[in-house]
Amino acid sequence: MNHAFLNINQEVSTALKNGDPIVALESTIISHGMPWPQNMETALAVEDEVRKSGAVPATIAILDGKLQVGLAQAQIALFAQQSSVWKVSLRDMPYVVSQKLPGGTTVAATMRIAAMAGIQIFATGGTGGVHRGATTTMDISADLPELSRTNVAVVSAGVKSILDIGLTLEFLETAGVPVITIGQDIFPSFYTKYSDYASPLRLDLPEDIAHLLDVKWKMGLNGSVLIANPLNAEKSMDPKLMDRIIEEALNEAEKNKIIGKSVTPFLLKYIADRTEGESLDANIALIKSNASVAAAISIALSKLKA
């Protein structure tokens, strides 16, 4: 908490001192994941979801040379509307901080900053992973190695549907990262409730998940736990339709030579356009649900520590 580059707002700082439940939230979903004004509306709604569930939200970003933990509404508006915001993963952090640039933090960067601040529960939409075609491109998200070494549990709707889910699960197994799905035996696929892959583990209650986290870290087993919270059936999209649109999006990205950190925003926008906003609605629903679940787990974990 005394790190020179951390700037923790008063609400989050007080919660940390009191041992209150806190949920970290990423900012790249604001700056790069959704269009205006849905990005601003969603960011505020997700924070409200955390508060209504009994925890303190801590949206994380980089601003004015500081790792900002907890954003004011005006700061969220800046990230929602400014086009020059960097999409920041771990490799970008020193550059963006040293140059005092605004940065929306990815899963990997948000995890690292949350850990520096002492926050152990993080809610996001979907994590990165092994990209389709990675056997030739070597395109593997920095989220995966970060999950293997940072003691911040991540609640998501699985990994993004645009990824190779099977290879991502294989990577996480090799890295020793427990993968838990809530309420079902099938691993979810972001926009859809199910995938073709069984979940390695299943736990249904926040208290049981918190107990697992407490045991894991007390045993000295460093690293995250990926907690997959399936999208509810009403918002879950047709998996065959999504697979077809994702393949189209990937082909379009290849044709336009979209590479690196530009790939995911390009694909998400393509999918949202082709589904006439249905995928965006699903994205908003799942991040709000994940925030609520993360708050429940954070509350249960804080009671174990009391």
Image (cartoon, helix red, strand yellow):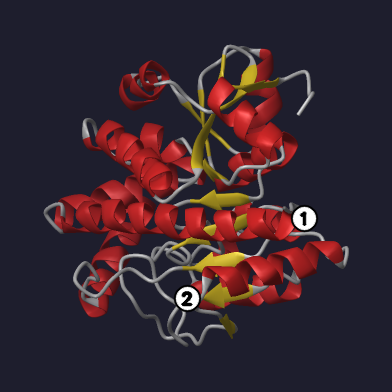
At which x and y percent is residue 18?
Answer: 67, 36
Q: Is residue 145 above or below residue 192?
A: above
* Residue at horizontal 15 percent and vertical 59 percent from the top: 275
Q: Quadrant of the N terminus?
A: top right
At which x and y percent is residue 191?
Answer: 31, 66
* Residue at horizontal 74 percent and vertical 74 percent from the top: 174
State the residue in front, 181 or 48.
48
Q: Is residue 267 above or below residue 105?
A: below
The residue that mark 2 highlights is: 182
Q: Disc 2 and disc 1: Cα gap in Å?
A: 23 Å
Q: In the picture provided, is 93 more to the left or to the right than 231?
A: right
**Is residue 139 shown to the viewer in this render?**
no
State the residue in front, 42 or 130.
42
- Would you call the spot at circle 2 few (<14 residues within 10 Å), some (14-19), or many (20 or more)? many
Q: In the picture provided, is 2 more to the left or to the right than 234?
A: right
The residue that mark 1 highlights is: 149
Q: Earlier in the sequence, mark 2 or mark 1?
A: 1
